[in-house]
């Protein structure tokens, strides 16, 4: 759909060959800006494929219902005030969400590196970024706890796009999305109580898997070598 922008007279600007300039001969320009951006006339030029193309005559033929100048100004003032209030609320919500995301990360990091007992005696972990850890905690590499394997190629002979009785196991791909399912398979290669970790792009995103599954496209799978609570290690990896 066509998008209109309001340019103030004291602004300097240049236009490329695909942008048109409308100069308001009469009426309230702010009202016209709101009106044109919400006019359903321009929907007919949007076919949902590629870029919308508008000719000069297409824009000039746009039908408009124009109230009196005083009504235009009243409507424009009303919209400026109401939309300003909404934009302020949106900004506050975005700030709140950012703070909550920071708090969430801090809670996870503190729990997996310091434990739940705030008064536990501590020791130096020997790892610069980790700092002190509870005195009773050990330190070991993931390779001592997990068998790590990269997701292989898709097995088309076992594949289905839909889940059914014959193909009950989800196939997960390399993505920073816990539910990035490529399809379903009749042959599971990994068991429940495992962890998947993205190994390409934004690497290191861990997801706990509590069911049997398959993995493809460089998604790393961590299968425990001993009895572990993989949920804890999922939080630990995401806190790195």
Image (tube, rainbow, N blue to C red):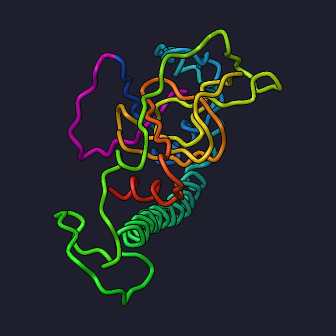
Magenta residue check for 131: no
Left or right placement of residue 36 versus residue 29 in this view: right
Q: In which quarter of the image is the C terminus?
A: bottom left
Give the farthest residue toward the top.
157
Q: Look at the picture and state if 176 lies above or below 74.
A: above
Q: Quadrant of the N terminus?
A: top right
- Seen at 37% across and 58% down, the residue is 239
Give the farthest residue toward the bottom.
119
Give the farthest residue toward the right.
165
Main secondary-structure element of the magenta-colored stretch: loop
* Residue 121 x, y percent position in the rendering: 31, 86
Magenta residue check for 8: yes
The magenta stretch spans which residues? 1-17
Q: Based on the displayed image, in which of its 4 quarters is residue 236 positioned?
A: bottom left
Closer-to-camera residue (166/30): 166
- Seen at 20% across and 74% down, the residue is 124
Closer-to-camera residue (108/134): 134
- Image mark count: 0
Left or right placement of residue 110 versus residue 231 in this view: left
* Residue 128 x, y percent position in the rendering: 16, 64
- Seen at 47% across and 48% down, the residue is 30
Closer-to-camera residue (204/85): 204
Q: Look at the picture and state if 120 lies above or below 113.
A: below
Q: Based on the displayed image, in which of its 4 quarters is residue 178 positioned?
A: top right
* Residue 208 x, y percent position in the rendering: 55, 49
* Residue 93 x, y percent position in the rendering: 50, 65
- Seen at 65% across and 37% down, the residue is 212
């Amino acid at each position: 759909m066509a998008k209109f922008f309001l340019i103030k007279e004291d602004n300097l600007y240049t236009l490329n060959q695909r942008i048109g300039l409308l100069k308001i001969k009469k009426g309230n320009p702010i009202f016209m800006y709101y009106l044109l951006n919400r006019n359903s006339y321009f929907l007919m030029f949007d076919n949902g494929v590629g870029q919308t193309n508008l000719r000069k005559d297409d824009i000039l033929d746009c039908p408009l219902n124009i109230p009196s100048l005083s009504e235009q100004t009243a409507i424009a003032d009303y919209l400026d005030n109401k939309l300003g209030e909404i934009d302020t609320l949106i900004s506050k919500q975005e700030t709140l969400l950012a703070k909550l995301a920071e708090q969430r990360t801090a809670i996870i990091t503190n729990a997996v590196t310091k434990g739940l007992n705030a008064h536990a005696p501590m020791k130096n972990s020997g790892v610069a970024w980790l700092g002190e850890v509870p005195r009773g905690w050990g330190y070991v590499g993931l390779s001592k706890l997990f068998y790590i394997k990269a997701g292989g190629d898709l097995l088309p002979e076992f594949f289905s796009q839909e889940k059914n009785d014959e193909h009950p196991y989800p196939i997960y791909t390399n993505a920073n999305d816990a539910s990035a399912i490529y399809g379903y398979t009749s042959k599971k290669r990994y068991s429940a109580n495992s962890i998947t970790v993205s190994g390409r792009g934004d690497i290191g995103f861990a997801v706990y898997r509590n069911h049997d599954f398959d993995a493809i496209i460089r998604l790393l799978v961590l299968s425990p070598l001993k009895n572990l609570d993989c949920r804890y290690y999922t939080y630990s990896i995401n806190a790195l």
